[in-house]
DNA sequence: AGGCAGGCTTTTA
DNA sequence: TAAAAGCCTGCC
């Protein structure tokens, strides 16, 4: 349909992915904070994603759920459109897909198989969460960006987190033209954040987290914090190393393990998960059953509860 | 040693 | 006004 008109000098390709992949659910899952809903036809960003009356795809609930996003990853930005029927259009070459986007979307493993294997018919709550939230995947996000983002996330809701991260990118990130020639700000490296003035950092509205962000930027620059070394550790060792960093407690360390280091068994316990465990698993949560993918199932529960908080309560 | 109260910036609903 | 994908410090 009108998507044809989007074809430009850059090469578009249509992917067929016969596994869980729902980009709208991923965007709202709370693991990433810089996915931006855009109009697939007009190429105009639409913050919050309200209406998509002109959505080209034959996507069932395109009226409610955006079907097209742009996703900053390092120095690149991916444009992806859900065409429905397991088809997705992306703006990039085959090489870029294989080297960047395929690993980023964690497309080498089957989330559908993981869901089905764990379902023994006894956990009706988890089954409902999985059915409702299937399509979520755990992205392979940059460890530095993930670390700073989840330090910023503490004790705040998601709109506030997104705002601070965007302010930080505007203040310190490189301005880059994406594959469509549009400008965006990359997530700033530690040296860029460490170089910010006190006033510039104040404008990022980090609150008391400002000291945490500045200090980890300085410590990574000086070498007293070595994220590359932490990347090579197993989950337990990484957890210990992360919780030793100023501003990182058990919850944030678990999020970094899961979303930044891809330790899929990491199980972040935040205010939502506390409520879920108390309400749905009063006899105790069956960690063994969902190992080694506790983090994936945590995401299904988290998103399910957060998106249906009123109806489930 | 390990647990717990109090404080913390700012935004959001 | 309370709550928000919590953590640090100080006290016991």
Image: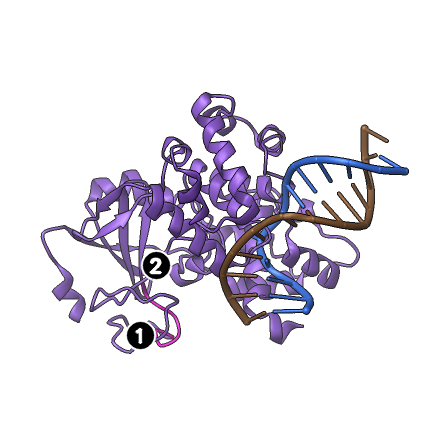
Chain colours: A purple, B brown, C blue
Q: Nearer the viewer, residue A35 or A118?
A: A35
Left/right placement of residue A12 relative to residue A117 reads left
Left/right placement of residue A181 relative to residue A312 reads left
Give the labeled residue for mark 1: A52
| SS of the residue under disc 2 | strand
Both labels 2 and 1 in a single chain: yes
Give the labeled residue for mark 2: A36
Q: Is residue A201 magenta?
A: no
- Quarter of the image where one finds residue A237: top right
Most frequent secondary structure within the magenta stretch: loop
Label 1: chain? A
Label 2: chain? A
Left/right placement of residue A210 relative to residue A79 reads right
Q: Is residue A66 magenta?
A: yes
Badge number at residue A299: none
Q: Nearer the viewer, residue A71 or A188?
A: A188
Where the C terminus of chain A falls, by quadrant?
bottom right
The extreme top residue here reads A223
Which residue shows up at 44% across the image and 61% down it? A25
> Label 2 vs label 1: CA separation?
14 Å
Which residue shows up at 14% across the image and 65% down it? A4
Which residue shows up at 37% across the image and 55% down it? A35
- Quarter of the image where one finds residue A12: bottom left
Where the N terminus of chain A falls, by quadrant?
bottom left
The first of marks 2 and 1 along the sequence is 2
In this rendering, the label closer to the viewer, 2 or 1: 2
Disc 2 crowd, CA 10 A, few/some/many (<14, 14-19, 20+): some
Q: Is residue A311 visible?
A: yes
Q: Is residue B8 above or below residue A1?
A: above
- Tell me the magenta residue range: A61-68
Disc 1 crowd, CA 10 A, few/some/many (<14, 14-19, 20+): many
């Amino acid at each position: 349909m009108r998507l044809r008109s989007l074809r430009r000098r850059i090469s578009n390709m249509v992917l067929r992915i016969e596994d869980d992949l729902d980009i709208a659910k991923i965007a709202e899952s709370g693991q990433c904070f810089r996915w931006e809903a855009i109009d697939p036809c007009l190429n105009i960003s639409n913050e919050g994603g309200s209406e998509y009356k002109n959505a080209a795809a034959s996507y069932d609930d395109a009226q409610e759920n955006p079907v097209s996003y742009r996703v900053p990853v390092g120095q690149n930005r991916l444009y992806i459109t859900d065409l429905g029927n397991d088809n997705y259009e992306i703006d990039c070459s085959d090489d870029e897909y294989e080297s960047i986007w395929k690993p980023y979307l964690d497309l080498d493993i089957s989330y559908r198989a993981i869901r089905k294997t764990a379902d023994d018919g006894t956990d009706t709550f988890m089954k409902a969460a999985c059915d409702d939230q299937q399509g979520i995947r755990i992205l392979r996000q940059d460890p530095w960006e993930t670390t700073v983002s989840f330090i910023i996330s503490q004790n705040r809701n998601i709109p506030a987190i997104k705002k601070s991260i965007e302010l930080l990118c505007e203040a310190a990130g490189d301005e880059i033209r994406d594959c469509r020639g549009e400008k965006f700000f990359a997530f700033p490296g530690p040296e860029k954040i460490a170089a910010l003035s006190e006033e510039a950092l104040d404008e990022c509205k980090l609150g008391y987290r400002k000291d945490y962000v500045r200090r980890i930027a300085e410590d990574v620059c000086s070498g007293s914090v070595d994220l590359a070394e932490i990347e090579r550790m197993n989950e337990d060792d990484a957890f210990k190393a992360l919780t030793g960093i100023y501003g990182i407690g058990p919850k944030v360390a678990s999020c970094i393990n899961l979303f930044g280091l891809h330790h899929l068994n990491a199980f972040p316990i935040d205010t939502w998960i506390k409520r879920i465990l108390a309400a749905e698993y009063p006899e105790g949560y069956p960690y063994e059953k969902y190992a080694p993918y506790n983090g994936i199932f945590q995401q299904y529960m988290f998103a399910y509860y957060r998106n249906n908080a009123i109806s489930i309560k």
